[in-house]
Image: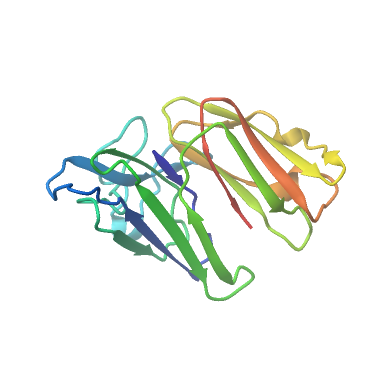
C-alpha cells in the first residue's frame, strides 16, 4: 500500500506522478497483478466526491467505503514505468494498493513544479507506505513559512493521530495537536504554525498514531 499527499493548491502548479515496479529476473510479461491509486476525500468535505477535471473523477466504481474515480498511474506490467500529469489546483491525495507480480518494489514518485507566486519552486516526494510513526526534522512554524503535514488514512476505520513538536530545548506546547481524527479513506492537511503560540524556526515533528494507521508527508 502507498499514500500520496495532495500536491498543491496553486493554480500555477503542474504535478507529475510516475509509478514503477521492477521486473524480476526471468519474470514474464504476462504476470498477474494490479497496482493503482485512487483519490482520497478531504476530511472536511463530508465524504462526497467533488467532481474533477472534465467531470471524469467520481464516475468510477466504489472501492471500499469511499474511494471512487479513475485510477491514477495504473501499471500494466513490471519493468515498464507509467507517468501521468495534472494541473488541477484541487488534485486530491491518493491511496493505492499493489498485488501479485506488481507488488514487490512498487514505488510512486510525485513531483510538482509551481511556476510563480509565493509557492514558486519544485516539490518532490516519494509516496509513503502507511504506518504508525513518522518523524520530520527541519520543519518550521516561523512567520515566513507555510509548513503543512498531510495526514491520510488509507483504511476503512478512523485513525487518531498526535502531532508533537520538538525544539532545541525539548517538546513544545502544542495541545491542539492531540487526538486529531482522520476519517476512513480521507486526508487532512494541518498547518504546523497553528499548533503553537510562539513561532520557532527549527522544529522536529513527530506524528504518532494512537489508533489505525496513516501516511504522513510534510509540505514545506
Q: Residue at x 84, y 47 (%)?
A: 168
Residue at 85% from the left image edge and 48% from the top image edge: 198
Q: Is residue 7 visible?
A: no
- Please, is residue 175 above or below residue 101 in the view? above
Residue 173: percent from left, percent from top: 82, 37
Residue located 38% across and 44% down the image: 49
Q: Quadrant of residue 142?
A: bottom right
Task: Find residue 19 and report its horizontal and vertical position in percent.
Answer: 34, 54
Q: Is residue 196 left or right of residue 19?
A: right
Q: Quadrant of the C terminus?
A: bottom right
Work out whether residue 57 or residue 169 is closer to the camera in this orientation and state it. 169
Q: Residue furthest left?
A: 30
In this view of the protein, which residue sits in the foreground, 49 or 168?
A: 168
Seen from the viewer's position, the closer of residues 54 and 99 is 99
Asked if residue 29 lies left or right of residue 153, the reply is left
Residue 101 visible in this rendered orientation of the protein? yes
Across and down, in percent, residue 127 comes to: 45, 49
Q: Position of residue 108 (x, y in %)?
A: 39, 52
Relative horizontal placement of residue 140, taking residue 183 as reference (left or right): right
Q: Splitting the image into 4 quarters, where does residue 147 fall?
A: bottom right
- Between 92 and 96, the residue placed more toward the observer is 96
Give the tally of numbered discs.
0
Residue 121, relative to residue 197: is it above or below? below
Where does the N terminus fall, quadrant-wise? top left
Amino acid at each position: 500500500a502507498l499514500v500520496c499527499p495532495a500536491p498543491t493548491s496553486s493554480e500555477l502548479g503542474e504535478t507529475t506522478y510516475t509509478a514503477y515496479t521492477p521486473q524480476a529476473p526471468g519474470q514474464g510479461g504476462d504476470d498477474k497483478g494490479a497496482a493503482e491509486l485512487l483519490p482520497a476525500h478531504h476530511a472536511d468535505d463530508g465524504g462526497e466526491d467533488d467532481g474533477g477535471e472534465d467531470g471524469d473523477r467520481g464516475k468510477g466504481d466504489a472501492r471500499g467505503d469511499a474511494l471512487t474515480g479513475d485510477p491514477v498511474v495504473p501499471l500494466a506490467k513490471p519493468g515498464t514505468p507509467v507517468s501521468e500529469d495534472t494541473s488541477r489546483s484541487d488534485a486530491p491525495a491518493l491511496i493505492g494498493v499493489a498485488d501479485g507480480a506488481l507488488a514487490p518494489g512498487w514505488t510512486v514518485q510525485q513531483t510538482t513544479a509551481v511556476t510563480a507566486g509565493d509557492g514558486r519552486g519544485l516539490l518532490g516526494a516519494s509516496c509513503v507506505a502507511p504506518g504508525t510513526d513518522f518523524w520530520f526534522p527541519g520543519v518550521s512554524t516561523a512567520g515566513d513559512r507555510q509548513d503543512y503535514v498531510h495526514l491520510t488514512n488509507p483504511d476503512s476505520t478512523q485513525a487518531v493521530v498526535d502531532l508533537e513538536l520538538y525544539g532545541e530545548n525539548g517538546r513544545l506546547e502544542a495541545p491542539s495537536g492531540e487526538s486529531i481524527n482522520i476519517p476512513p479513506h480521507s486526508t487532512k492537511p494541518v498547518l504546523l504554525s497553528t499548533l503553537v503560540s510562539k513561532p520557532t524556526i527549527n522544529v522536529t515533528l513527530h506524528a504518532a498514531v494512537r489508533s489505525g494507521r496513516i501516511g504522513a508527508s510534510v509540505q514545506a
